[in-house]
Amino acid sequence: MTSRLDEQADKEARDLARMNAARDETKAQRRKTAKAAASSKVTAKVHARFEVIEGEGIEHAGVYHIGTGRNGDGDEVELPPQWICSPMHVAAYTRDVQGNEWGRLLAFHDPDGSAHHVAVPMALLAGTGEDLRALLLSHGLRIATDKGPRSRLIEYIAQAKPDKKARCVTRTGWHGNAFVLPAETFGDAAGEEIILQSARADGVALTQTGTLADWRTRVAMPCAGNSRLVLALSAAFAAPCLGMMNAEGGGIHFRGGSSSGKTTALLAAASVYGPATFMRTWRATDNALESVAALHSDMLLPLDEIGQLEPRAAGGAAYMLANGTGKTRSHRDGSARAAARFRVLFLSAGEIGLADLVREGGGKVRAGHEVRVMDIPAEPAGGTLGIFERVPEGVTPGQFAEQIKRATAEQHGHAFAEWLRYLTGNADAARAALRTKADELLKQLVLADAAGQVRRVAQRFALIGAAGELATDQGLTGWKSGEAELAAYVCFRSWLKARGTEGDAEPASMLAQVRQFIEAHGDARFPPADRTDDHRPNVPNRAGWRKDSEATGRVYLVLPETFRNEVCKGFDHLAVARALREAGVLKCEEKGFTRSERIPAEGSKLRVYVVMGRKLLGDGDEDECGDSVDTASFFADQSEENHD
């Protein structure tokens, strides 16, 4: 009995042990399975990422963001892809020669299938990125409209790690032996790609339509025989030569009446580069003009309607464009930013001149204005055809202008590209040819001892003429040899005649100001010096006295303080006195510029400036600086050869 009970107990103990062992094995297996599952989850962990999906037949190609989230079991999984923009690749890092101004080169196609390579500064990624999106949208990139996916665009650009690097520049034109344009670089880039990196969205209108041969036939050749049109086209070819010749920038301004053909000349010059939209207007702020100039560096900058320029800003704008330096600005921390630098030759037109605008704004016209901006009468002397000297037989000036405008709309852009290929591919030969031609023309324009200001202007005309001749030698214009040189000569003589003197401008301006003061206040503020009676006039704002004699005519005795503060306002009074003395207008003692003169009306002697009125007021005739060549016969011969 006891034996059976013991056996039963042993059996139950064994069964319990087996159950516990099985349970322990199950727990171990579960732990092992859980560990394996956890390990599997770590191995298959998902990551947020960007992918570019593109290729033929793909309906919704583009840049996608694939985010992550957790499902109902708490597992991390991929979320549905979000479309960010049309296909775009971050092709390269960009930075300037100092290792600053970092950016990214973005490559994509617009809806027409045209390729775009846009260098964007990383500064555009700051903030909400609105300026960045505006820039890319203007180039044809399609971007998501929903705020969430749209905001991922900045992240996509910032996280990219391209393999290539490129050198960025912030202005067009010459950089070493390479000529950089917004969409293309000509010449040797020294082993590293050079690209234009700008935050501006509008860019430069450099497009091509038609053919070079048709542009030459329909635009350039019909301009032959018209000095202003030929000069404008020659200036378009001269602009890229400034850097090659280490020449200073500057401008040409055609001043004349409305509908005289000035805009036609600007459109013809602009067609060397692109369509009519290549031409700008003066209606812009200083900052805007500075940005435009940086995008036209080493290129022509056509600016129409100078009358739209704010008069108070006129002088400063001219200096800024000609000197090639923008304003110095500061960073937020107060440190100075590098000022924008550029080199432009600008072509301007308007019914008034720069000097008129400066005076309208209450400023004083300086000699530097006329040296930097060459003011040329739009209508040739004695002409009856507006800006033209000749038009085709049976065609009115208005019809001829319309023909030129229509031709520029249909044929443009090819000449500039071909010109750059020649300049970058033959830099040394081109530079030598330009120097030879310019030096020869300069000898015809001025004498070796010409005044410095006149010589500076003559050098610019000589370079323009030389560039036009070299472009003709390369088969770009279809003109006869000498056409561009003659146009430069004729326009230089017109500028010189309008200027009124072949010397420096300051002495002439000083004499003109003194003359204007005497003419305005002669009798009112200069009472007779010899009147001592009780009925002599009472002059409350007296500037001096006047004396009359048959030998010397009227003489003005100007009080020293009035001479310094009023007569010479805006000038150094000693420089004015020196100019008057050299012109024989100021009667001086052996030392100094004043004289001790007896004034009977005052009963004493006073020191005054003695201005010879007859000499001053009779010295206002303009110098005659007319043409010394028979341009009419030359133009007639030229038109026959160019328009057979």
Image (spheres, helix red, strand yellow):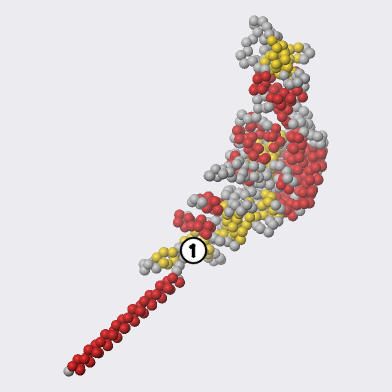
Residue at x-position 60% and y-position 41%: 328
On screen, residue 162 above or below 633: below
Image quadrant in which the N terminus is located: bottom left
Q: Quadrant of residue 192?
A: bottom right
Residue 74 lies, in percent from the top left, at 37, 67
Count residues near mark 1 (Cα–Cα under 10 Å), then give few for <14, some for 14-19, many for 20+: some
Looking at the image, residue 113 sits to the left or right of residue 144; the answer is right
Res 200 visible = yes
Res 394 visible = no
Nearer-the-camera pick, 308 or 594: 594
Residue at x-position 31% and y-position 81%: 23
On screen, residue 637 above or below 614: below
Residue 288 lies, in percent from the top left, at 59, 42
User: Outermost residue toward the left?
Assistant: 1
Residue 72 lies, in percent from the top left, at 36, 67
User: Outermost residue toward the top?
Assistant: 534
Residue at x-position 59% and y-position 62%: 163
Nearer-the-camera pick, 404 or 511: 511
Dot 1 lies on which element? strand
Residue 2 lies, in percent from the top left, at 18, 93
Q: Quadrant of residue 327?
A: top right
Residue type, label 1: Arg
Looking at the image, residue 523 sits to the left or right of residue 110; the answer is right
Judging by the rendered image, the residue that carries numbered circle 1 is: 49
Nearer-the-camera pick, 69 or 636: 69
Q: How many marks?
A: 1
Residue at x-position 49% and y-position 51%: 128
